[in-house]
Image: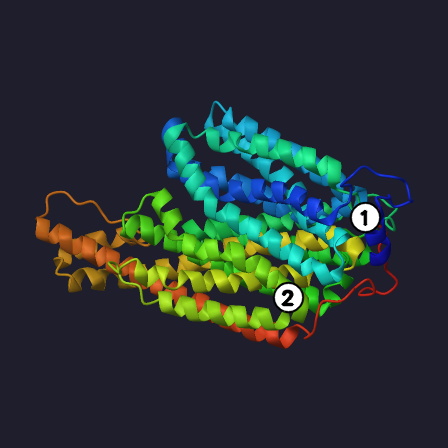
Amino acid sequence: MEQVDRAAVGSGAGAQGRPVRWGHGHPRLTLLAVTFGLVMVVLDNTIVSVANPTIGRHFHASLGELQWVTSAYLLALAGGLITGGRLGDRFGRKRIFLIGTAGFALASLACGLSGSLAELIGFRAVQGAFGALLFPQTLAILRATFPPARLAQAIGIWAGASALATASGPIIGGALVQSISWSSIFFVNVPVGALSLLVGSWVIRDSRDRRSRQGLDVLGALLLSGGLFSLVWALISAESSGWGNPQVAGFLGAAAALILGFALWQLRAASPLLPLSLFRSRSVSGGLVVVTAAVFALFGVIFYLTLYLQRIHGDTPITAGISLLPMTGVLMVSAPVGGWVVSRIGPRLPLAVGFLLVAVALAGLSRLQPHSPYLAIGAWLPLIGLAFGAVQTGGSQAVVGGAPKHLAGVAAGLQSTAFQVGGVLGTTVLGTIITGRVTSGYGAQLLRAGVPTSLAHRLQPAARGVAEGLVPHLAGVTPAVAHAVTLASLDAFTHGLQSALIVGAAVALAAAVGAFVVLRPGRPAAVEAVLPGEGSVAA
């Protein structure tokens, strides 16, 4: 099938030998087309965080209300990625990609035109739903277009474009908010989406699972979406409320029940949404663990280092984004290079070495102090960027390249879901570690800094704010006491950050061992026979 597809592309013929226009099905042009859609979604993930304070002031929103601007998007996105990928397999990846792109761009326009916070939150949820249609197709289309020997290189470029969008999001967002308005961060998606639609309509050749003649597994989609929604909701709530909150426990229980019900239903469904036999592939199962671990560490680093730079060093969001460029800039280059390496020797060794380098870098960053010079951060960031180029490309290659081509959409949905859940899990777990370390040691830190005992006891409830890098504002105390409180608060936050970074390093080290043990050595190969009796048909 790979040879037939390449011949069709090279000769300018369609799947049935029909003449097609110039560029139709061309691999590099197809990669360009899906990259436009990818950049639009990834850019939106990072660009909005910069504008949140301005949005809050514009709508006079509380912090809790403002968090829904991000949470509504994330919940809708994470809950629909696997279903979105399966829709592409069933009804055509090009069609679903274009629908998702158009819907995302229009929802972005509606976000920018919102007249109230409720409208903005609603349209952010719509954005996330269309993002769930769009995002998995970017990898699925690459899987259907490139042969196994070249897929890792394509995924490397895909990962590099994602890194570029991640790096430029805070910088672009800050510039737009400062020079125009908060609405402009949503309007920027409209021309990008239009360009993606134009190029995608022209060059992408459709592909789908033609073996699936039955309708969509609606019950499976509802069970899985509900389970993922409950899981992500619980993780988001745990970050602010703590793991002992009854609401968090309730949503975790609901997530477990719904996902278990989904798995049991998939064993009975005539046309399952997610064939569980896919997990028999060591490449797919191991790759999912690798992607989750990688994003767990990466998102924790980006989120809490950004917090450290802004609230401890006093950087602006734009300056903090620029400060992280040694990591994201190297990642833009290392991801395509990592794709080339993975295509030559397979993902096993690059993943193991990459995670080892991440562990070393995070251990180095764990020595940060409140007033450490930027060099103490910047010296380790290029190493993280270098390592994650191989890690992100190798993990994505293992999942999407390890699945049969006709299940490329659902495999890409799995990869995207692991990416989102890993990110939320990383910020939540590492945030819990920081909070626990700060609240348990804040009183002792205050006393060691010379704060009077009575005041130290009164300040203990402020520990949760200190865990977010905030220093309590005091009135009626001497400058010396205020200075002592500031020093103790900065020390407490930094000690918590050190603990979180050590945990991140341990996760990276465990992932290095896991990748080496679970994944098979050797170059990527065709996997059309991973599942017995299954094949691939491209349109």
Q: From this view, report whether residue 237 is shown above or below residue 193.
A: below
Q: Quadrant of residue 389?
A: bottom right
- The residue sitting at 34% across, 60% down in the picture is 377
- The residue sitting at 63% across, 71% down in the picture is 348
Q: Quadrant of residue 516?
A: bottom right
User: What sort of colour scheme is used for the picture?
Assistant: rainbow
Q: From this view, report whether residue 3 is shown above or below residue 118.
A: below
Whether residue 60 is visible, yes or no, is no
Q: Secondary structure at mark 1?
A: helix
Q: Position of residue 324 (x, y in %)?
A: 40, 53
18 to the left or right of 468: right
Give the residue number, with chain letter if any, for mark 2.
342
The quarter of the rendered structure image containing the C terminus is: top right
N-terminal label among 1 and 2: 1
Q: Position of residue 146 (x, y in %)?
A: 74, 55
Say few, some or many: other residues with alpha carbon within 10 Å of mark 2 (under 14 / 14 to 19 / 20 or more): many
Give the residue number, with chain letter if any, for mark 1.
9
538 to the left or right of 160: right
Q: Which amino acid does the dot numbered 2 rest on?
A: Val
Q: Quadrant of residue 476?
A: top left
User: Which mark is in front, 1 or 2?
Assistant: 1
Pick whichever, 42 or 319, lies toward us: 319
